[in-house]
Image (cartoon, coloured by chain):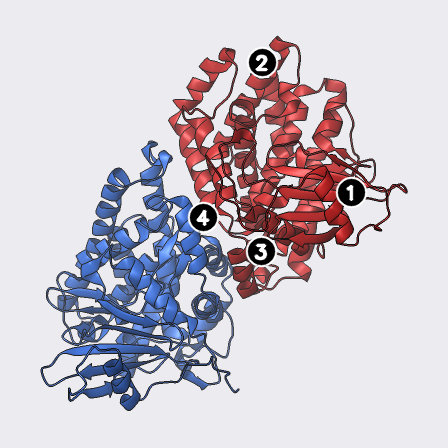
Chain colours: A red, B blue
Amino acid sequence: MTIALKEGYQPLTEATAIQLIKELGYFHAHDQLRCREIGDGNLNLVFHIQNENDKALIIKQALPYAKVVGESWPLTLHRATIEGNYLKNAIPLVPELVPQLHHTDEVKALTIMEDLSHLDIVRTGFIAGKSYPNLSRHIGEYLAKTLFFTSDFGCNQQVKKGLQQAFSNPELCKITEDLVFSDPFHESDTNDFEPELKGTVERLWQDDSLKLEVAKLKYKFLTHGEALLHGDLHTGSIFANETDTKVIDPEFAFFGPIGFDIGQFFANLLFQAITRTEENRDIILSHLHQVWKTFEETFTTLWHTSSVETFTRTKGYLEYVLKEYFKDSIGFAGCELIRRTIGLAHVADLDGIEDSSRRLASKKIAIELGRQLILQQSNITSTKDMERLFEKVKRGE
Amino acid sequence: MTIALKEGYQPLTEATAIQLIKELGYFHAHDQLRCREIGDGNLNLVFHIQNENDKALIIKQALPYAKVVGESWPLTLHRATIEGNYLKNAIPLVPELVPQLHHTDEVKALTIMEDLSHLDIVRTGFIAGKSYPNLSRHIGEYLAKTLFFTSDFGCNQQVKKGLQQAFSNPELCKITEDLVFSDPFHESDTNDFEPELKGTVERLWQDDSLKLEVAKLKYKFLTHGEALLHGDLHTGSIFANETDTKVIDPEFAFFGPIGFDIGQFFANLLFQAITRTEENRDIILSHLHQVWKTFEETFTTLWHTSSVETFTRTKGYLEYVLKEYFKDSIGFAGCELIRRTIGLAHVADLDGIEDSSRRLASKKIAIELGRQLILQQSNITSTKDMERLFEKVKRGE
């Protein structure tokens, strides 16, 4: 399929990236710049540009197609605008937890931002056994602040409707609707799993009570415009080191159910819990508890100090809202565990396990844990419950 | 407050309305036209223009303020565009149940449409004791078709997101958020009730369990973008006679919870059930049963014949969805009963009762029925249950 491009858009090369960034005045004309394309290559070009004094910047440019399936899957360049606008909205709320934004260009579909290459991608670091002690406290705070202040509790309700309109993101939402909620639960060409998992997967496809719960979760994703979500908050979208945390890649942002962001993070911690040996697992489980604890505490504080909604003074409302968010998070985490194991887009936590019997065993745990989380959303009311379920599934009970 | 008007906008007079409609060619230049402004005067001008042969048309023009509180409450003219676009969307779905649309003009904030003056406003007719035998069947069909085909079950999910963006309607939604959900449940200057009701009303304001349920309903209204709602579907927005039904005034349209439209209609039937004598009440109760029955049957047929959502084949999903819609309808009906009794905008069904002790008694029943519907949303699972609750409250149990 040929993709018609908007006038003024041209994918950058390392040479034209250097030219552009000089024109924009971020480096001196006589600087000797080195430029490397460092994108993981699915949807975007990412250029790392550095001068002799090690001052560096990132240019991220959207490609008009999804590379994951070749050039045949066209994908809106508008997602670069969404990403830029999301960052502009998030920077005043969580300045320490997102990259600095230098420049956006809608037509060229690019964003120029802070270089974060002194940090690790958390997924990669986790797989190498690292722990990032501040990660869950930071992500809990990130979730509470970005979600509260774009919800009807923390954002003027008329302003919120304008934001919701501006962040309409149908094409990227469709990827999630299909790849997270629909395809993994039905026979579909986009699914991807080892033949040894066929029986397990087919049992999912025949499981009406599971599919009913997934249908309800998809409906929430389609209809519940609670807050401006990151929309893709897995451990590959987070940079960190011992002290700092930065969330990147908000191109899937839209107004959706609050539990979705939380659930994606839960699930991506659970992949590590599944694959790590017992002695290295505690830090992951403590992240699981800590992220919800920080989210809950921060959200509660904001509820009491920064509400714009008169009913936030009503007894029991906060508890109700938090309970619903948690329940939704559990369900969404379950969907993420399953789709990252048998759907189109996998995680290196599982696929990177070289020993095939251990890899298959881990995948079966991920599927079963996902299934149980989805079916037991209402019974799992704390991260301790989630840990207990994890232990149970891990033991094969 | 002075209201800055967009260039090109000028409120019409009877003379300029005639001039306009001739310029647009809807009548001959030499036609002798009679023009009357027939609006109820809250938010819009409505001109009825007729020639010697009784050919007639309606021009509806939005005013830049809400007259209900004088010129001091500015209100977006964009609602005329919303109204026109809603009709354009509804006409192919329910051509018999909405007025024919001849012309729209965004700048002049007006819509030219079919004259419906051969029909009654249902509220007025109801108060005069009329019955409109086809009303509930028509409204049930109207609800099922307009809601299904703009929901994620009957509308391409990406197209729906575009519609949702186009129907963003913050200012009109705010009226509902304040006047339906917030103000009647708190001490507020906008409330309006007889001193004799003060004790009853203050008990509502102190009722935390009631307010918690109202908070949840308001949150649904704020966040659940299920389908394109009419947004103001009371009996004053419906014209009818013995055979025909036409829904008008969709300027509050936006993507919201499906139960809201259904619940508004339920509640406005209940006002009649409350105020009518026993012998005239049966037709109203049968409308209550029939509107849900027709909605349910039509929605079910569309679910099976016209779905765009793969999960509609999942066992139990339709039943779940209908149950949720019904539950929401009950809660929203409860809010409507209360706000139309003690809030800013009343209904003539109650206010028109001349005998003050009978009027107050009816209002107390409306409030108590509203309260019970809100609190018992989960227990009332059929219109028979709703009728039983009505009888109980009516008997003063």
Q: Which numbered mark, 1 or 4, is in the foreground of this view?
A: 1
For the residue marked with disc 3, what is the amino acid?
Ser
Instruction: Specify whether disc 4 shares its chain with disc 2.
Output: yes
Which residue is outermost to the right? A53
**Image mark for residue A151:** 3
Q: Earlier in the sequence, mark 3 or mark 4?
A: 3
| Horizontal relation, residue B309 to residue A368: left or right | left
As drawn, A1 above or below B166: above
- Chain designation of label 4: A
> Could you tell me which secondary element the residue under label 4 belongs to?
helix
Amino acid type at image mark 4: Thr
- Residue that badge 2 annotates: A360
Q: Please report, as a chain letter, where disc 1 is located.
A: A
Compared with B64, B206 (above or below) is above
| Label 1 and label 4 in one chain | yes
Mark 2 residue crowding within 10 angstroms, few (<14) / some (14–19) / many (20+): some
Report which quarter residue A381 is drawn in.
top right
Residue wearing tag 1: A115
Question: Residue A73's spot in the image, x, y percent?
Answer: 49, 34
Q: Residue at x 43, y 19 (%)?
A: A203
Is residue B368 at least partly visible in the picture?
A: no
Q: Nearer the viewer, residue A344 or A13?
A: A13
